[in-house]
Structures are given as C-alpha cells and as structure tokens.
Image (cartoon, rainbow, N blue to C red):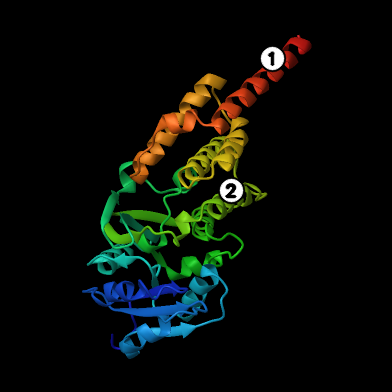
Amino acid sequence: MDASVEPTVSVIIPTYNCDRYIVQAVESVLQQEDCHYETIIIDDGSTDSTEKVLEPYGDRLRYIKQKNQGVAAARNHGIAVARANFIAFLDADDYFLPGKLARQAEILLKRPDLGIVHSGWQRVDQRGNKLLDVCPWLQIPELNLASWLRWKPVLPSAMMFRREWLQYAGGFDPRFPPAEDTNLVLKLALKGCKTAWLRQITVCYRQHEASAMHKGLPQARSLLAVTNDFFAQPNLSHQVRLMEQSVRYGTLIWIAWYLHYTGHQTETIEYLKQAWKYRSNSGIETLITWVESFAEFAHNWGVKFKANDLTSSKEWQELVQWMFQQENLVDQTTTCDS
C-alpha cells in the first residue's frame, strides 16, 4: 500500500514463534480489496525463522521486533504505532477471508456511534480444513454489556475497533493472559462502547495444540480472574450487580466444561463446586442442568460429548457425594434454626 496515503485500517499481527502460519496470515491481509490498510507485524521476541520468512515482503508491511512481553504488550505496541483510525487484529495463526476489512470499515464509517464491529468466524484445523462455522449473532443478536458478560463471544481476529476507544480503555491488560481480550471488551462495554454485528464469517480461527484456547488451566484461571476483576470494581450500577450471581454461575460452568474438554477432570470438579453456591435449582436439578450445559457447549464447539464418560467417572461420583453432603448440612442447619 502507498505509504504516502493515510490508511483507513491498521492491521496488527502479534506473533511469537509462528513462522509456520504467519505467511498465510500476511497473505490474507495483502489480498484484501477495496480498503486502504497498513499491515503491522509486532514480533514478540520470536526465536524461530519468523523474521526471515517475512523478509520478501519488504515495505509491504511494517515489521517491529520487541523483547518478549506477551501478546497484550505486542498488541498495545501495535496500537501505539498504528496510523489508521480503525484497528483490526489478526493472530498470526489465523487468516482473514476476502472482504473482511472493507465491510467492517464501511460499517464504522457509516456509524460514528460504534466503537466495535464484530463478525463470525470459521474454526479450522491446523491445516486449514473447516471444522465449524460460528455465527454468534444467532444466539446473541445484540452485543451489550449484559450479553458480553453472560456469553463472552470475544475473538479479536473477527473484530474491528475504533482506535480512540482502545486508547480510552487503556489497551490490553497484561495481567490476564490469555483472556486479556475478554477483559478489554468488558472494559469497553462498561464505558459505553457500542458494538454491531457484521453478520458474516470473516476469519478462519485455527485450532492447534499451541493456540490459546488449548491452554486449559491458564485459560480457565484467566477467565475467572477477569470475572473477579470486573465485579471487584466499586462503582458498578445496581443493574450490573443484579447480574453478578448468574454471570459467575454461567462462567464457572463454561470453565468446568472447557476443563473437561481439555482433559483436566479434577479441576473440572473444583470449578463445579465453586458454581454450586450460585445455583438456583435443587441438587439433582443442578446436576442434570450441568450435564445438559456440557452437551450444549460441546455442540457449539463442534465436538462430541459423551455424557456417560463424565457421569461414570470417579471424579463425578465424588462430586455427587459431596453435593449430598452439602444438602444434608443445609437441612441440618434449617432443622436447628426451626
């Protein structure tokens, strides 16, 4: 792109040891049409051949290498040097589909009240083979603070941001890897940032063992830390406070399923025990709801869920015994009080 013309969109690609995928990511940006953009690579201290494989692109992209500080710092560095008013992030192992930048930028240009345009994505395997189309607007037609809190449909590669909103929110918080993106969106929504859907698939989200969503325990702990941090704020409205119990409950159930999916069965039960105190149903009803929720999450994720593998496990049986103990303690307390 002509460096003398101010770009409409700055595409920021943070990368760390991703030479296997980054060329496809860059090519997917360079093939975007009908939109003036710049491509910024923030290399977060890679030790592989990332710099070498990017050399042939010359001045078609801006390559900046920094000391390894994590993806939050890399994205924030990109925001700081970006020239455009609109910011699109692209993880180095993902890739855009044609028309992504132009269509999202068009919405932001027409809607100055918006700070974010979100879209759908396609899950692909490490070779780029399609796994599942994700169209979150079917379940979440409106993106406001309540829906962000309850559903957290965050994927930076599928979003476009107005730069001043990112600056206003202070960028990504490095305390919450790898859920710093969820933390940012919640901060933005709380500050009044409006989001609209572009109801189409715009990016391919690659699933592989090194991706953030396969980092079971760190992802779970980070998401819970983000939730705790949000509700620890002193000046939340009464309406937001009323959502706290259901949001915490739903977040803990999703985390438990995610840990079950990633093979952390002991921790799955620990998070279900944490969810217990936020339940609104009886013990048996709660257990049934948990299994149904796991099945729904698996379906939305495009993976198989075998309820019997969960409920026949030693950990689940211990959970059931623990649950009955909790209910007996409640019954005994109630009897003594009466």
**SS for dot 2:** helix
Image spot of residue 245 (x, y percent):
58, 35
Q: Quadrant of residue 331?
A: top right
Does the rendering let one see residue 140?
no
The x and y percentages for residue 197 are 32, 53
Given contact means CB atoms under 8 Å apart, are the residues at marks 2 and 1 in contact?
no
Amino acid on which the number 2 mark rests in the picture = Leu
Q: Residue 155, can we see it?
A: yes
Crowding around mark 2 (Cα neighbors within 10 Å: few <14, some 14 to 19, many 20+) is: some
Residue 107 in the image: x percent, y percent? Answer: 29, 62
Q: CA distance from mark 2 to mark 1?
A: 30 Å
Q: Which mark is residue 119?
A: none
Q: Quadrant of residue 244?
A: top right
Residue at 47% x, 33% y is: 310
Q: Is residue 244 above or below residue 172?
A: above
Q: Secondary structure at mark 1?
A: helix
The local crowd at label 1, few if under 14, some if 14 to 19, many if 20 or more residues have their Cα within 10 Å, is: few
Give the residue at x 30% y 48%: 135
Residue at 35% over, 60% down: 206
Residue 230 horizontal/vertical position (percent): 60, 50
- Left or right: 176 with respect to 201? right
Q: Nearer the viewer, residue 281 or 318?
A: 318
Residue type (three-letter) at the residue carrying disc 1: Asp
> According to the image, label 1 marks what residue?
331
In the foreground, 67 or 126: 126
Q: Residue at x 57, y 28 (%)?
A: 279
**Quadrant where the C terminus lies?**
top right
Say which residue label 2 marks. Answer: 224
Residue 175 is left or right of residue 138, and the answer is right
Position of the N terminus, as image quadrant, is bottom left
